[in-house]
């Protein structure tokens, strides 16, 4: 479990909070200032659609940097898609839990950087399982790359 916690901390610091979730919140904030299920789903769809996601990545240097980091960890295929699926589900829960209050969402992410384990514990069991599996994927890729 130590590797999973360490991996999740890396994910929070370098990927979810820096660009993917921030990109999600930015797209979401442009839509509404209060909860709007349609806007949440539109943002989730953006994260899960390679074409829409690439457009958003191309438009943001921070998102582009995070995407390249994610590609380095997960490759450019199904595993990367799982990362974005996890990010979209985390975003959905974050948006719903904060009732669409984007400053509150950013505050939650800031706290997640300081306490990734607490953030992890607030995830659904399904989201926790996705994170565990992503950690195992990175671990396997790392071991495979070692001579």
Image (cartoon, rainbow, N blue to C red):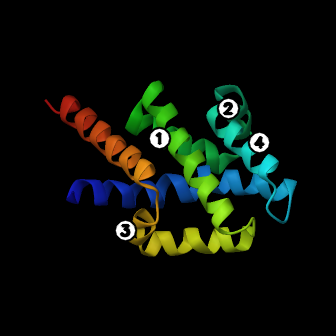
Residue 117 — which label?
A: 3
How crowded pointer 1 is (Cα within 10 Å; few <14, some 14-19, many 20+) is rated as many
Lower sequence index among marks 4 and 3: 4
Considering only order in the chain, which callout, 1 or 2, is on the residue closer to the N terminus? Answer: 2
Residue at the image point whose x is 75% and y is 64% from the top: 100
Query: Where residue 14 sits: x, y (%)?
Result: 47, 55
Is residue 47 rendered to the left or right of residue 138? right
Residue occupying the point 36% across, 47% down:
129
Earlier along the polypeptide chain: callout 2 or callout 4? 4
Q: Quadrant of residue 56?
A: top right
Do callouts 1 and 3 mark residues in contact (Cβ within 8 Å)?
no
Q: Is residue 104 above or below residue 38?
A: below
Q: Earlier in the sequence, mark 3 or mark 2?
A: 2
- Tell me if mark 4 has few (under 14), some (14-19) or many (20+) residues whose alpha carbon lies within 10 angstroms of its own: some
47 up-or-down from 102: above or below: above
**Total numbered circles:** 4
Q: Is residue 38 left or right of residue 107?
A: right
What label sits on residue 42 in the rendered view?
A: 4
Label 3: how many Cα within 10 Å (few below 14, some 14–19, many 20+): some
> Mark 4 or 1, which is nearer the eye?
4
Circle 1 residue: 70
- Using the image as rendered, state which of residue 26 and residue 129 is in the foreground: 129
Q: Secondary structure at mark 1?
A: helix
Q: Position of residue 35 (x, y in %)?
A: 79, 61
Residue, disc 2: 54
- Residue 94 image position (x, y, % from top left): 61, 61
Which quarter of the picture shows residue 42?
Answer: top right
Q: Secondary structure at mark 4?
A: helix
Up/down of 54 relative to 132, above or below: above
x and y percentages locating residue 111 in the rendered image:
51, 75
Marks 1, 3: nearer the viewer: 3
Task: Determine whether, in the image, residue 108 is placed left or right of residue 100.
Answer: left
């Amino acid at each position: 479990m130590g590797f999973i916690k360490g991996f999740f901390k890396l994910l929070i610091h370098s990927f979810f909070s820096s660009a993917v979730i921030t990109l999600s919140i930015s797209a979401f904030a442009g839509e509404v200032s209060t909860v709007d299920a349609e806007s949440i789903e539109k943002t989730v769809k953006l994260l899960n659609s390679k074409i829409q996601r690439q457009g958003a990545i191309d438009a943001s240097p921070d998102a582009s940097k995070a995407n390249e980091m994610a590609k380095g960890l997960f490759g450019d295929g199904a595993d990367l898609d799982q990362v974005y699926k996890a990010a979209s589900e985390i975003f959905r829960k974050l948006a719903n839990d904060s009732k669409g209050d984007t400053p509150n969402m950013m505050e939650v992410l800031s706290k997640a950087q300081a306490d990734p384990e607490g953030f992890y514990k607030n995830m659904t069991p399904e989201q926790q399982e996705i994170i565990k599996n992503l950690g195992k994927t990175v671990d396997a890729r790392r071991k495979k790359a070692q001579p």
